[in-house]
Image (cartoon, rainbow, N blue to C red):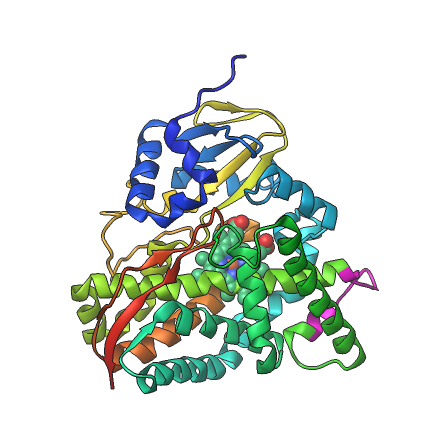
Amino acid sequence: MSAPTMDEAAKLFADPMAYTDEAKLHAALAHLRANALVAWVDVPNYRPFWAITKHADIMAIERANTLFTNSPRPVLMTQEADEQQAAVGISTLIHMDDPQHRVVRAIGADWFRPKAMRALKLRVDELAKRFVDNMAESGDQCDFVQEVAVNYPLYVIMSLLGLPESDFPQMLRYTQELFGNDDAELQRGTSKEDQMAALLEMFQYFTSLTASRRANPTEDLASAIANATIDGEPLSDIDTVSYYVIIATAGHDTTSAVISGGLQALIEHPDQLARLRDNPELMPLAVEEMIRWVTPVKEFMRTAREDTTVRGVPIAAGDSVLLSYASANRDEDVFDNPFRFDVGRDPNKHNAFGYGVHFCLGAALARMEVNSFFSELVPRLESIELSGDPQHIATIFVGGLKHLPIRYSLK
Ligand code: HEM
């Protein structure tokens, strides 16, 4: 069989800069949805893959979780980074498949159920108020991303884990370096050694946390992870650390991107901000719309276990497919006017949290955090506008704004 031909637009998936220009990004994704729904991508430094851009195809692939597995390639990275991660042996929920995945996911699952969420709500509301109060007290201007949006979700996740506030700044650095590591401004250094050092430091932090929670168990998620057993055996060090890493990283940049991107959308659509202020009961729908609009997780990947087809395109056993949530959530076949920001959008079948057995474990927490924040902010806003150009982080995985300069007046 001759090699598949590549649509030039499909190169964007491996280009961190592509996600910094939303208009250009969405033009390219719309082109792929219309012309190359299952697009072959073969670019230097990456193992080739198929990019899937239609919402329905992504849902079908995620549903078929034995035909399309997460291992061995759950996210898009350079071939070199793929090999490095394999060497370190990190294996988080997103790297696993059933039956192991089901057992390991169950360890943390109780901490994200409605009962646990209700218990956490007071603390989340208190943090939301603290960050909005800070905005009010610190004057009438700020870089909303750096001063508010990156901190608040981290405080929430650290509270859930049960970690002291004094460790928060350190954790902030780790998660930014690991997730933002395609962005020159946030990188710790430029060399592979520097990035590896960030990873190892984070591992050390969590290894000592495990030891301390095993010696003195407490009522928090960190303790549940440290003291979990599978078939009567505790988790290995690497598995314990991997669990903390997925919670701390997955729960952080994702939610902060929705909060900052959601605020930008409200500022740029003053009619929608006014509508939300006048109709606070719309908040749950507005939260869903912000999540769809921002779609902070740009992609996940799956690997075909057998020869199969997607939309008639043959996919060979061993081929990788990239699920473009960024594209799916602007799919014209699923959303009326997908490029309209509508705080009352209903239905809103976005798949920003994925679908199926890997469906985001923290979805209820993320929704609650975004809801608490805007329920505090919106009624207190007397005015708000941009005071500079918003800038996006360079990434091919999780991302959103890195700067959102705003000027405001708050009650
Ligand atoms: C708006 C914010 C968030 C978005 C958009 C988001 C998105 C996602 C997506 C797309 C996946 C993969 C789903 C799939 O493969 O089908 C995922 C998995 C996951 N998320 Fe989230 N997430 C968010 C917030 C959170 C929070 C707050 C936490 C935890 C505190 C969290 C923890 C996880 C975990 C542990 C997984 C792995 C689940 C598994 O593989 O079984 N996420 N998330």
> Can residue 94 be seen by looking at this rendering?
yes
> Can residue 361 be seen by looking at this rendering?
no
**Would you say residue 234 sits in the magenta stretch?**
yes
In the displayed structure image, the side of residue 197 where residue 9 appears, left or right: left
User: Residue at 66% of width from left, 64% of height from top?
Assistant: 202
Q: Position of residue 404 (x, y in %)?
A: 33, 65
Q: Position of residue 325 (x, y in %)?
A: 42, 46
Q: Residue furthest top?
A: 1
Dividing the picture into quarters, in which one does residue 409 lie?
A: bottom left
Quarter of the image that includes the N terminus: top right
User: Residue at 43% of width from left, 71% of height from top?
Assistant: 368
User: Residue at 59% of width from left, 72% of height from top?
Assistant: 170
Quarter of the image that includes the C terminus: bottom left
Residue situated in front as seen by the camera: 71 or 392: 392
Q: Position of residue 93 (x, y in %)?
A: 64, 54
In the displayed structure image, the side of residue 287 where residue 186 appears, left or right: right
Q: Position of residue 191 (x, y in %)?
A: 61, 50
194 up-or-down from 201: above or below: above
245 up-or-down from 98: above or below: below
Dividing the picture into quarters, in which one does residue 115 lie?
A: bottom right
Magenta-drawn segment? 223-237
